Image (cartoon, grey):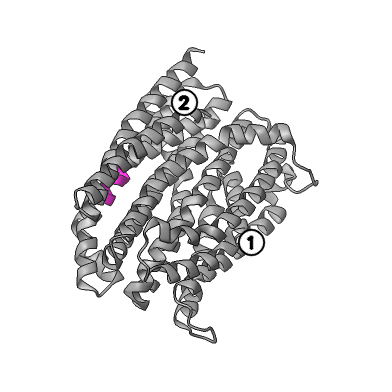
Amino acid sequence: MSQRRSFTHEIARTAKLAAPLVAGHMATGMVGLVDSLIAGRHGTATLAAVSVGSAMFWLPMLIPLGTLMALPPKVSAFDGAGQRERIAPVFRQTLWLALLLGGLMWLLVTWLPLVMAPFGITESIRPGATAFLHGIRWGVPALTLYLAMRYLCDGLHFSLPTMLFGIGGLLVLAPLGYAMAFGRWGFAEMGAGGLGLASAMMFWLQMLCFALYLAFAKRFAALGLFARFEWPNWALQRDLWKTGLPIGVTVAMEGSLFIVTALLIGRLGEVPAAAHQIAINISSLCFMVPFGIAEATTVRVGNALGRQSRPDIYRAALAGLVLVLATQLCSGLVMVLGNEAITALYTQDAAVAALAASLLLYAAVFQFPDGIQVLSNGALRGLQDTRVPMFLAAFAYWGIGMSLGATLGLGFDWGPPGMWVGLIAGLTAAAALLAWRFVHSARRILQA
């Protein structure tokens, strides 16, 4: 097979694996979109409360979301090396890890409302944000278990369940969230609290359906995923923590850059908080596309590593980069050309809509650096190189992005636009540093 044909084949393989991942992540991202659309129709105060509540919920949840990402590269490497008998034990240990993380996150989310006042969140926003957090916290253990199951399938090059269960959950959340927020079909009107509780119920339904699927699907029968009960194996647990915790911290560094930005903007009042929520919803939804491609690249790079096919490591990363650049171009154009039409879907408040439309133009600017940095991170996870990227990400996101954003947005009174300039700077620095790290790590492995 010629090199050009081989590269084209790699792009096709990556796209085929990434497409259901992107659809599944889009469905997950649309959880926030649905919550915000319903909240925006309920009122500006509800939208602002959901904005702050969502930010405070996803900030700690980024740690388990990233830590459990240790599973796909390990599963993919075992699959590539023909060691499929090692997949079930590491999966069962990941379930224990997911339970532990879910319990810890439940406790943390329970106590998070206590930091709203010290953090300076506007007093009118606090009750609704607290109600949202106290509702959604009940779904945390289900969410971490669901992630472990999803990552197993992703590592096996079978991402269709991610899409189906993600879309299925969304179809449940939309009517249920509407009913519980507005008080329809026998439910009391609960506003932001109802949206949080509806999200928790959706998480449990997704997890239970996924578990039943893995237990009875013929595709997974030979793996024996639930063939036996095993207590935590501390050697395997240490290995998962060693690989996964730096991933979790890296994901948290990036996600918290956006989330803390939302919390800081929440100090400026309801209109800036609501406008930022609209813009960040759209940005987050678009981010699910390169994020899905990055996860597919993790699997493809990990599989090449397991097969000891060194040229395929570069080929897999380059294929992912081509796909990401194409998708980010589309996202940027949508934000530039459709910013006003998009904001009109969320709110009828003219002040909120005007500010949100301007913030979408800033979001369009960082589409390329955002795509490159998440793709580089995904390729590095495939190499199981996670520790150094963690420090590089921390420096870029916080040393550059948050420092500049807080200085411009709050120190120089630029408001939300200043915070978004910081986001652009942080993501651009991360793109450069992480791309350099991948080239360095891949060259080191190729020379080994």
The x, y position of residue 9, in whole percent, is 43, 34
State whether the magenta stretch is mostly helix, strand or loop.
helix
Q: Is residue 50 above or below residue 332?
A: below
Q: Is residue 211 left or right of residue 440?
A: right
Residue at x 44% of width, y 81% of height: 182
* Visible residue check, residue 369: no
Q: Is residue 48 above or below residue 418?
A: below
Q: Secondary structure at mark 2?
A: helix
Judge by depth and name the residue closer to the eye, 424 or 372: 424
* Element marked by disc 1: helix
Quick check: 330 above or below 135? above
What x and y, as percent, mark residue 144?
Answer: 59, 52
Q: Amino acid at mark 2?
A: Asp
Rendered residue at 43%/31% (across/down):
391
The residue shown at (23%, 56%) is: 359
Mark 2 highlights which residue?
312
Q: Residues within 10 Å of mark 2 (few under 14, many from 20)?
A: many
Residue 331 highlighted magenta (yes or no):
yes
Could you tell me which residue is drawn at 36 percent across and 25 percent down?
A: 436
Where is residue 240, by image quadrant? top right
Residue holding disc 1: 209
Q: Nearer the viewer, residue 141 or 374?
A: 141
Q: Is residue 204 above or below residue 304?
A: below
Within 10 angstroms of label 1, few (less than 14), some, or many (20 or more) residues?
A: some
Is residue 110 at all visible to an observer of this figure? Answer: yes
C-alpha span from label 2 to label 1:
36 Å
Q: In this view, which residue lies farthest toward the bottom? A: 186
Residue type at tag 1: Cys
Q: Which contiguous range is marked in magenta?
A: 326-332
Residue sitting nearer the eye, 221 or 280 = 280
Front disc: 2 or 1: 1
Q: Position of residue 377 (x, y in %)?
A: 43, 35
